[in-house]
Amino acid sequence: MKRKFSFFLAVCLAALSFAGCGGNQSAQANNTSYQSEAQISDESSATDDISDESTADSEIPERPSKTDNIYEPSENEETSETSETAESTESSENGKTEESSKNSDKTSYSVNSQQSSKNESKQTSQNSTSQQTSNKPEQQNSKTESSKTPVTSSKPEESKTSTPQTSSKPAEQSKPTQTSKPAETSKPTQTSKPTQTSKPTETSKPAETSKPAETSKPAETPATPVSSDYDIGGMALYNQLFNLENKVTVEISMSDSEIKKLQADYNKYTGSDSNKKSSIFRKATVTFTVNSKKYTLEEVGIRLKGNQSIEPFYASNGKPNICSYKLSFDEAFDDKDDYGSEAKKWSSSAEREARKKRKFASMNELDIKWNISYDDTNIREIYATKLFESEGVLVQKIGLSQLKVNGNNYGLIKIYEPIDTTFLRKRLPESAIGGDLYKCMWSECNNNGARTGGWRGATYQMNNSYGVQDNQKGIKYNFNLKTNKKSSKHEQLKNLLSVINKNNLTKDELEKVIDVDYYARFMAATYFAGDPDDIRNNYNNHYVYFRKDNGKAIFIVYDNDRTLGITYGLNRNCATRNPYSSYAATQGDQLNPIISKTVSHNVPSAFTYIRDGLYKKALDRLASSAMLKSDADFNKMYQLAKNNYEGIVNPYTRFANQESTFRFSLNGNKNGGDRENMSFEQFRSQIISTYQTAKP
């Protein structure tokens, strides 16, 4: 009996010992789990600290948005909501994203580079047998990009690391199902399909050190992936192309016969009528060099660009002009109306399809403009884009580049992302894509396309014209439709004009046709940009887009080459103008009813909440931002440009249309008259002083 009891006691003690060991192991496991979470939290905080110092120009940190992407938290309130990304037509992997943000009163409309970049090299089985380019880097077991055209890159993109570096918060699109730590991770490659990230390191260099979003980081809307199998370089190259830390060269090679055609196009159209210009593209070989990497594209379409500023390739005395150009990467050259007997005959429909789908750096086209406003620094328009981006306002990317034409140095020019559907897809969710996009400008045409002889700007009055412009016939409207050209009946534009011109306009009526929060930030940024040739001061140079999902109008910045103290050509100093002015700087009385009823003196009582609330908050944010507190950020950006381009800024010859030698300095004369510009510091200090004493 005693033995049995001893044996039973031994068994019990052994069981208790085993249970105790298991409990300790469980506790240790739990402690390990807590420690791991704490470490992740620390890593996330570290990422935030780094991202606040980051100057990447490709993304603005994301704020979740409501269903209609309008988000306006109370001041200094910490918020966290879930934004739902619309299902992409190119990829079904986009899901819900969550992110917390603080102290922001803005809606986001900004480039979502990472989400687009992660889809940029997605391969499809039906295209796997198409012709591949020679640009074939190997990264993360991802298939290489292919232009699927005869065009090849002479030097492939090479990856330096395995993680993208373009975003101030690189992983904000990852881990879509997380709720405790939404997108606050330091692991930028944790996407739903990590192997689809092609050439992610091509954007590792930060942006122009201007830190545009220090005090007012807007939310970022879920963007639609835009890259495809036919995209050379994709979003990674897009980010590099518009980063001032990278030296860029654009080399255009054209045969004498193609130059003669370009010249003949000018003589046929613009030479006989200043309202006309050719829409016909001629053939060129274009080589882009980004730092040491080259990308050569054959049969790129090229045509002269500009309205009042358009010039022929050669002047009448035979000397070359410095010109602005539009490049088209998907031109097929087979339209018989344009090319006649020289129309290209494609060997197969697949070959033609590959050309029509060809993109370079995620873009179908690229605009090139020379320094027509004689900005001594060459960066004011680029700096202004950072000002707009800091308020979440849609604006095209702009970069610098050396231009070479047939081997000759043409000096320093600016390259521009075109405003089109691809532009919108980078910045808006899929649900918003598909609406009417209009370019807004001066015109003498009525809605029938007939010239009336009475010029008027895009004043948003009932007498404004709208339609599809025809460059070769000289038919241009106040609102030139750029999308849905065959299907649109302009219902939303007509409704907008009808509503905002009502005598007793109500708050609800206005907010049904305009994204009011976005509009207030747009107007505040245009004020501090100080362009005398914009929507506010000259009824010119902007786009209006009607979102597909809610029908509301949002405004897009365009052609700010007379900004931040540039007075060349107009001689209007906008730094002394009251932000609530009831006048347009170049036109007198403010005729735009949107502006006069919302942000000017004597607005109706129903809209003082815009002028004294939304608009004033945006003005205050910008006035106190690092970008306008001093010229330090401006000088940093200038120094980046100077380091890369000082040696090539002067062209190989004095062009026939060049009024003076190109300059590259921070100099500028405040009182130099119509042919001189203020310095940035003069403009900055003057407009801040004006704002501080301004009253509604």
Image (cartoon, rainbow, N blue to C red):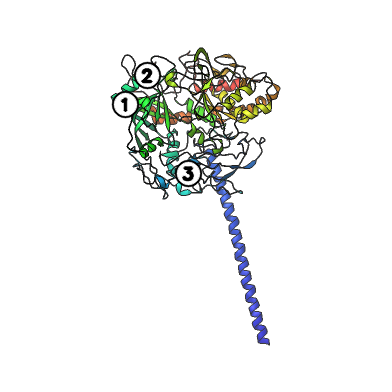
Which residue occupies the foreground of this view, 316 or 76?
316
Q: Earlier in the sequence, mark 2 or mark 3?
A: 3
Tell me which numbered mark, 1 or 2, is placed earlier along the sequence: 2
Task: Find numbered disc 1 in the image and state the secondary structure of the residue it sits on.
Answer: helix
The disc label shown at residue 341, or none:
1
Q: Which mark is residue 266?
A: 2
The kind of residue tagged 1 is: Ser
Amino acid under disc 3: Lys
User: Can residue 334 be seen?
Assistant: yes
Is the residue marked by circle 3 packed among few (<14), some (14-19), or many (20+) residues within 10 Å? many
The CA distance from mark 1 to mark 3 is 43 Å
Q: CA separation, marks 1 and 2?
A: 20 Å
- Tell me where residue 473 appears, x and y as whole percent: 43, 19
Residue, disc 3: 118
Give yes or no for contact between labels 1 and 3 (Cβ–Cβ under 8 Å).
Answer: no
- Tell which tag, 2 or 3, sits nearer the viewer: 2
- Looking at the rendered structure, the kind of residue marked 2 is Tyr
Which image quarter: residue 388? top right
Element class at badge 2: helix
Q: Quadrant of the C terminus?
A: top right
Q: Residue at x 33, y 14 (%)?
A: 316
Quarter of the image for residue 544 reads top right
Crowd tier of the residue under label 1, counting other residues whose Cα lies within 10 Å: few below 14, some 14–19, many 20 or above: few
Residue 640's spot in the image, x, y percent? Answer: 44, 31
Can you give x and y, in whole percent of width and height, for residue 414 in the image?
42, 27
| Residue 426, numbered label | none
Between 358 and 243, the residue placed more toward the observer is: 358
Q: Is residue 24 above or below residue 297?
A: below
Q: In front: 56, or 455?
A: 455
The label nearer to you, 1 versus 3, is 1
User: Which residue appears at 37% of the width and 19% of the height?
Assistant: 266
